[in-house]
Image (cartoon, helix red, strand yellow):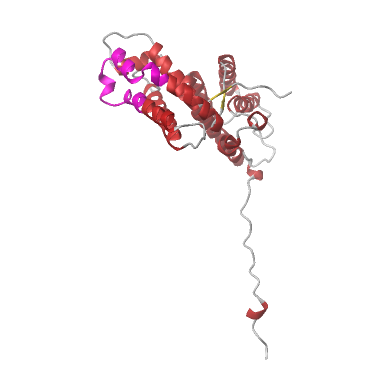
Amino acid sequence: MLKEFELTDGSKELADVGRAILDADRVKGQNVLVGFAKCFDVDPAGPIFFELLSVLRNRIHVVEEFARRVQDKELDDSLRNDVVAATKSFAKLFGPGQLVTVWDSTRASCLPEANIRTLMWFGQTARRHRPLRVVSDPERLHLIDKIDDALRALEDDPLGSWKKAPLKNGLVRLRTVLQYFKYFGHERAIEELLLFDRKMEALNDTDEDPFNALSQPKLPSLRKVLEITALAGTLFILPDQAVTAYDRYVTWTNRMVVTATHQPSERLLLAPPIATIPRLSELPKHE
């Protein structure tokens, strides 16, 4: 039997973020910047803080644009307009002028309960067009443990430092997204996974031995790294069987993944030019 997957979508996930912001601890008298830092549980002076703000603001924009353009017979203009209004209101929380206003009152005005419910309702439409697999906390934490294990193994393996650097950087980036997955979301996780796959492929291309360490890894650290990419792929990318009813999904996520994960030997080349054969009437006549 095929495994059942619980599905989610970008609109519902955005509603969950809105709920997390509303439920975050009160920071009496502090501004929105401090409130976001408390909500994210990060240092506002740290390198991750403004990246989280930027990613989350972009996710709001993605849902808004999707709501404007999606064609669905069960989506009426009233709900479409409500979703656009809800995302615009949410986005106001990130405006330069709002970032220095009082956190407790500003978040309440930008994220009323009615708007969060609207985003949840729109999720039914979003799942028909862009379904995402729910990643549970145990699955996410298990993958983080695997990444930590691989990072420790890389430190001890006799792999060249110029090869270690992009692998470590890619693993740390993926770990960061997993740690703050609620705010980064699926799309950023898939992007980081694909970027990491590109780094692996680039290292593979630089080795003169066709049976090199990345294609048939002998070093324990590289085996651990490849296990991570396989495990992450099963978490974030739905198998075809699980999305039979979602034709548009196949042309959305799967196409991106398949294109980006071809091995060098599997890449398709352009067909050679087709020879043009002249018509008989166009051939030169011999006297």
In the picture, which quadrant includes the N terminus? Answer: top right
Q: Which residues are magenta?
A: 88-116
| Image-based side of 233 in relation to 18, left or right | right
Question: Where is residue 73 drawn, in percent x and y?
Answer: 52, 35
In the picture, which quadrant includes the C terminus? Answer: bottom right
* Closer to us: 205 or 133: 133
Query: Is residue 220 among the parts visible in the rendering?
Result: yes
Number of marks in picture = 0
* Closer to us: 223 or 100: 100
Measuring 55% from the left and 15% from the top, which residue is drawn there? 137
Measuring 42% from the left and 15% from the top, which residue is drawn there? 20
| Residue 226, image quadrant | top right
Depicted 281 relative to depicted 112: above or below: below
* Closer to us: 269 or 255: 255
Query: Is residue 161 among the parts visible in the rendering?
Result: no
Question: Where is residue 142 drawn, in percent x and y?
Answer: 59, 16
| Image-based side of 58 in relation to 253, left or right | left
Magenta span contains residue 97 = yes
Question: Where is residue 74 drawn, in percent x and y?
Answer: 51, 31
